[in-house]
Image (cartoon, helix red, strand yellow):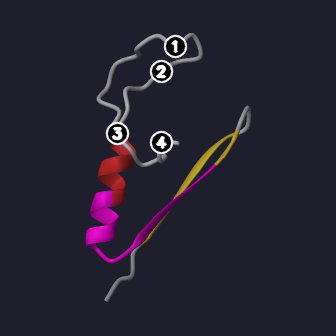
Amino acid sequence: MRSTFSPAPPLNFLCEYQGGSGVGLSIVQTLVMRLGGNADVESTPGAGTTVLVTVLTA
């Protein structure tokens, strides 16, 4: 199973390419982890997706 944070081309519900690089969450996770934080994703089909990014500040 592919991770949510793995780069992939974006698809719409008809499986047609919609543009973009598909690396958005992968980049977010890499940057957040370099800052010592965490990125979590919760998704409910038909309801939406929430991305929670946590980074400690000084």
Badge 1 or badge 4: first in the primary sequence: 4
Measured as percent of width and height from the top left, residue 11 is found at 47, 21
Residue 36 lies within the magenta run: yes
Region rendered in magenta: 30-42
Separation of marks 2 and 3 at Cα, in angstroms: 12 Å
Separation of marks 1 and 4 at Cα, in angstroms: 17 Å
Residue identifier under label 2: 11
Residue 47 lies within the magenta run: no
37 to 21, vertically: above or below: below
Q: How crowded is mark 1: few (under 14 residues within 10 Å), some or many (20 or more)?
A: few
Please, what is the three-letter code of the amino acid marked with disc 3?
Answer: Pro
* Label number found at residue 7: 3
* Label number found at residue 2: 4
Please name the residue shown 40% across and 14% down the image.
17
Please, what is the three-letter code of the amino acid marked with disc 4?
Answer: Arg
- Residue at disc 2, secondary structure: loop
- Marks 2,1: beta carbons within 8 A: yes
